[in-house]
Image (cartoon, helix red, strand yellow):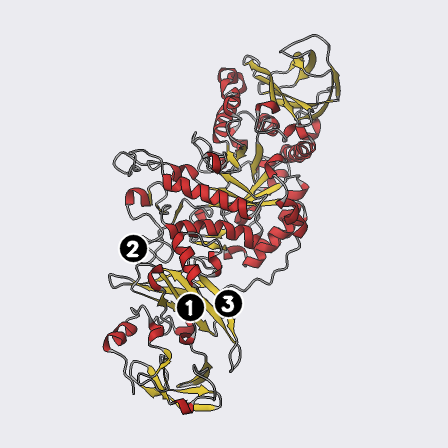
Amino acid sequence: MTAIAADDLRRLTQCRHHAPHDVYGAHPHPTGQGWVVRTRQLGADHVNLLIGDAVVAMSPAGNDIFVAELAPSSLPEGEDVPDYRFEVHYPSLTTTKADPYRYLPTLGELDLHLIAEGRHERLWEVLGANLKAYQSPMGTVEGTAFAVWAPNAHGVAVVGEFCSWNPNQFPMRSLGSSGVWEIFIPGLGEGTEYKFAIHTADGRRIDKADPLAKATKAPPETVSVVASTSAFTWSDQQWMEQRSHSDPTAKPMSVYEVHVGSWKQGYGYRELATELVDYVADNGFTHVEFLPVAEHPFGGSWGYQVSGYYAPSARWGSPDDFRALVDAFHARGIGVLVDWVPAHFPKDEWALGRFDGTACYEHPDWRRGEQPDWGTYVFDFGRNEVRNFLVANALYWAEEFHIDGLRVDAVASMLYLDYSREPGQWLPNEFGGRENFDAVRLLQEFNATVHRNHPGIVTIAEESTAWPGVTAMTEHGGLGFSLKWNMGWMNDTLEYMKHDPIHRSYHHGSLTFSLVYAFSERYVLPFSHDEVVHGKGSLWQRLPGDDWNKAAGLRALLGYMYSHPGKKLLFMGQEFGQIGEWAEERSLSWDDMEGWGGEYHRGIARLVRDANRIYQDSCSLYSQDFGPEGFTWIKGDDAAASVLAYVRWGSDGSPLLAVVNFSGATYHGYALGAPHRHWEMVLNTDDSVYEGAGNDMPRYVEATDEPKDGQPHTITVDVPAMSVQWYRAL
């Protein structure tokens, strides 16, 4: 009987063999005549080799290894490489298995080349766990192909309940210098729970979740799950076709930002596909944006510390359940954005951190590889395989879930090597500067690749600094984002609004400053989740005065936001003026709209619905968001009155005049310059239908021919305290 070399046997029994397929499986006999077949079946009493109708008893060779030597005459006629099965006899069970070690690698040379180059745009189809079937003379063999990148591991195995978590049953082979380990395991199908047992250079075994798992168990479980080849039937073909021929940034964009777990606690993707979709549509939003839905271990991170980049969180349902949610939004004409976190990831030992025992996904130097603020690791943006992992992940969400946009979190932390670091805690670039050129190249590749593969998709940067060209095209040296959150506008506006109205005249520049740079990038105006947590209070709480004044102030703030250049974003709850601060462990305070005082919140909700409708119907409010031709100051310098007035121009030449009064005083007969003579008031945040004062104000206003404020006409209007009016030219 042909023996296994001692060194091979030692490494096999320690799960440190880089090529177990060279030992196990069917191989030509050393004599050149016939075959030798080896298998390891842990705990088996004996094993028979089945070839056609023949049954060959395999000889035990120690360490649960069984061997059969086959003379050419024992093989079915005409077969060189036999097709066979193992009949495995355990003390209380007999089962028939196909051999994992008789199959060629499921990754080809081109796959490995593209991975090494960082250019495999469908990485999820070759790494992770993918269902596969082979046809053979003895019948179809179905199973799962497993592959994982672990370049410094000394051995890798697939483990799970199917092998009692013993790494010696299914050791994987290393595919050359690629760092990829691979095996096809027959009989493992959809729903199989698994991990990769990594044997490190320093002698440890660490069981890791699959970085490309398409499904997981819900936290606190940490196992990966073999996902089905999706049987989901999409019904959004018309939506996707129209999207591919359109520019979303030229259209109205009013985004409702949602944390899945706390909009209404207990709801999963399927429940939200009815109730949330109806709510967003009824309130007139054009898009929904989800805080990260990729799997994350700690709910308190809100999804911003991701462990499973390719798996929608199992907290709320299956991947197909999430597909159904996206499909339902598309059926109502609503785009779906998701937050994406390529900046950093948590240090959980079972996840990406030190994946093969060394710095694999993270930068090896702690001065670049750790984010002190969040206690996380930072991706090594310059490593080809890591860049591939991230760019392919963005494509995955667009391809597999029909996502209409990705909002990239914490871009500033990626761009600056000294972000939130003290001197001596960061490593300069090759020119001695603070710019992270690897991150720049990653973001450029991400944007260029996503837009090339999925025309009509939108990418949005949460970038809080003045980094130039965030929304400039990559071919012009920009980062290539479609849009950027205007954090400066948000901070200045909320800082202004916290002051008592009597003091706002001293802070007027906080409002007008935004128009100094409003057209330097393509902006979104965000009142996001970050502004209603960590003791900041809700928008309602941040406004001064009693309930009446808070309601009036919030209505005016919203009227101002909707008329200011830039796309719009509201975090859930702010559309009805939720009183309390948001927390992820409880539902929104829907009862704020009930009972005594609830009328103020119902009024705010109605205002948002009406503002969304008028916004979408008014070309002047969205078609020229990104250039000075879409905006004209009428009154920018009336600090004493805390009044702003400006015209928004549509690409068709239509004007809309916005008059904003953030003071506590009403101004009767306030004179303004105007570009046209005849105007119709289309929105008044002080209207009684919104629980405002409801003063009688004319719907139609006619200007005189007297020039004023650089305009050919003068319009005289009443401007109620703490209110915004929109006038459309007739």
Taking the image as drawn, is residue 168 in sight?
A: no
Q: Are marks 2 and 1 in contact (CB under 8 Å)?
A: no
Taking the image as drawn, is residue 477 in sight?
A: yes
User: Is 88 on the left or on the right of 482, as rendered?
Assistant: left
Figure check: 187 above or below 680: below
Task: Looking at the picture, tell me which residue is in the foreground, 36 or 422.
Answer: 36
Q: Could you say which quadrant of the image residue 13 lies in?
A: bottom left
Q: At x 31% / y 83%, what residue is drawn?
A: 30
Q: Which residue is mark 2?
A: 358
Q: Amino acid at mark 2?
A: Thr
Query: Which badge, 2 or 1, comes first in the chain's sequence?
Result: 1
Quadrant where the N terminus is found in the figure: bottom left
Answer few, some or many: residues within 10 Å of disc 3's Cα (few below 14, many 20 plus, some between 14 and 19).
many
User: Is 186 on the left or on the right of 663, as rendered?
Assistant: left
Q: At x 60% / y 51%, what residue is drawn?
A: 326
- The Cα atoms of the two marked residues, 1 and 3, are separated by 14 Å
Quadrant where the C terminus is found in the figure: top right
Question: SS at mark 1?
Answer: loop
